[in-house]
Amino acid sequence: MINGMEKIALFIDGANLYSATKALGFDIDYKRLLREFESRGYVLRAFYYTTLVEDTEYSSIRPLLDWLGYNGYSVVTKPAREFTDSQGRRRLRGNMDIELAVNAMEVAAHVDHIVIFSGDGDFRSLVEAVQRKGVRVSVVSSVNTQPPMIADELRRQADTFIDLVELQSRIGRDPSERSGRMQETPRFLERRAAPPASEDDDELSTS
């Protein structure tokens, strides 16, 4: 604790969070998201994880990542992997589970509360391991999508489950900010725990 404030670390699975909020029909305002959790305690670190397509001259997610890096977030990226599916089509896949898990285990000794923004059931073992260190774990995802974005085993393991619908009014972007502005289209990648993400991400607003 710092002056009685709980020390918090945020771990954001970018592709998974994007898929969930898109299914719910709203966009994240990352400035408001950070402010929301700063109101709950002392945010020691806020990590954002995503894969990047390296063979493109310009990645449309780059403005978001640059903004996050300058505004209180630690951005963790790695190249996407290309593969050919059963129909012979070129596809991209990226997975940041290991990076997120390693960082969470490293940070666990220094915080009271870890908040994971993902519904990926693969994180259940991570949550259990962090809890054994005496750290409380909240998971942010949604059951208000079809199908639910949160894996049942992850929801049961977490100390607290926070539905994105409950946070929407506090971390969502004002819909009026979307009008009259060209939208960028970051290429979020296929995930095991999320439906194939489309390429029409509209998440680049940061204010």
Image: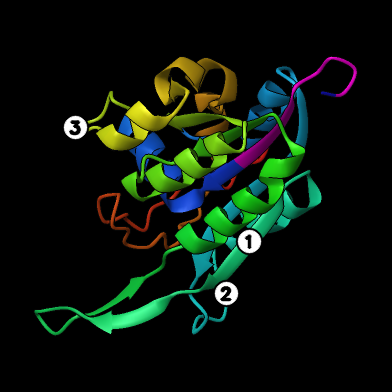
- For the C terminus, the image quarter is top right
Q: Secondary structure at mark 3?
A: loop
Q: Secondary structure at mark 2?
A: loop
Q: Position of residue 164 (x, y in %)?
A: 43, 25
Q: Quadrant of residue 157?
A: top left
Identity of the amino acid at label 1? Val
The reply, left or right, for residue 8 in relation to residue 77 is right
Tag of residue 157: none
Q: Amino acid at mark 3?
A: Gln
Of marks 3 and 2, the one in the foreground: 3
Residue span colored magenta: 2-10
Q: Which residue is mark 2?
A: 58
Badge 3, how many Cα within 10 Å: few under 14, some, many 20+? Answer: few
Q: Earlier in the sequence, mark 2 or mark 1?
A: 2
Rendered image quadrant of residue 133: top right
Which residue has dot 1 on it? 76
Where does residue 87 sit, x and y in percent of width and height?
9, 80
**Image location of residue 17, percent across then percent down:** 44, 42
Question: What's the residue type where badge 2 is placed?
Answer: Tyr
Residue 38 located left or right of residue 125: right
Q: Looking at the image, which residue is at 62% across and 32% down?
A: 135
- Mark 2 nearby-residue class (10 Å; few <14, some 14–19, many ≥20): few
Asked whether residue 102 appears in the rendered view, the answer is yes
- Taking the magenta stretch, the answer to whether it contains residue 28 is no
Q: Is residue 149 visible?
A: no
Instruction: Count neighbours of disc 1 (C-alpha within 10 A) and say few if under 14, some if 14 to 19, many if 20 or more.
Output: some
Residue on which disc 3 sits = 146
Name the one closer to the observer, 123 or 120.
Answer: 123
Numbered label tally:
3
What is the spatial separation of the Cα atoms under label 3 and label 1, in whole angstroms?
29 Å
